[in-house]
Amino acid sequence: MLKGALPTAAILAAAAAGFIAGRIMPTAGAATTRVYELRTYTAAPGKLDALNARFRNHTVRLFEKHGMKNIGYWVPTDQPQASNTLIYIVAHESREAAKKSWDAFRSDPAWLKAREASEVNGKLTDKVESVYLTAVDYSPMK
C-alpha cells in the first residue's frame, strides 16, 4: 500500500459516513454548528480484536450516554492497516459539546472500569488521531 493511503481511506470513510449521516440527521437547510469527528486508532500489536471488543461491548454505548452520536465504524481492507486500524466517526452538536462529551466520557466510572479491564495485558492503542469536520454547502447532510 502506498504511503499516505490511510488518510485517503479515512477521507473516503468520512465521505461515506457523511452520506449515511445525511440520511439519519436533520438536514433541512437550518444553520447548524454540528461537527463530525473522524478518529483513527492504531492498535498495539495484536490488540485490534480486543480494541474492537471494547468498542462493541462498552465504548459505543458510553459515547451515546455522553451525547455523542455514533455514525459508523470501519477497519481498512488492505494491509498493513487491516490488522491494526480502527476508524470511526461520531457527531457532536458543536465543538463545545464535543469537549463536554469527551470530558464526561473520560471521567465516567463505567469507562474507567472497562478501560482498566481491557488493558490488563497492556494498552490497546499505540496512536489516536482526531480530526473535526464540518459539512460543505453541497454535502447531502448540509
Image: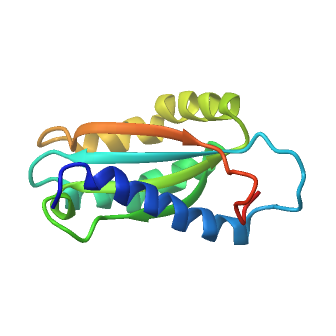
* Residue depicted at 48% across the width and 47% down the height: 38
Left-right relation of 53 to 73? left
Taking depth in this image into account, of 98 and 136 the one nearest to the observer is: 136
Q: Position of residue 139 (x, y in %)?
A: 70, 60
Q: Quadrant of residue 123?
A: top left
Taking depth in this image into account, of 79 and 72 the one nearest to the observer is: 79
Q: Position of residue 122 (x, y in %)?
A: 13, 39
* Residue depicted at 75% across the width and 63% down the height: 25
Q: Position of residue 32 (x, y in %)?
A: 82, 44
Left-right relation of 132 to 118? right
* Residue depicted at 72% across the width and 66% down the height: 140
Left-right relation of 11 to 80? right
Image quadrant where one finds the N terminus = bottom left
* Residue depicted at 40% across the width and 60% down the height: 57
Taking depth in this image into account, of 108 and 101 the one nearest to the observer is: 101
Left-right relation of 98 to 85? right
Taking depth in this image into account, of 6 and 36 the one nearest to the observer is: 6
Decide: is 72 above or below 35: below
Image quadrant where one finds the C terminus = bottom right
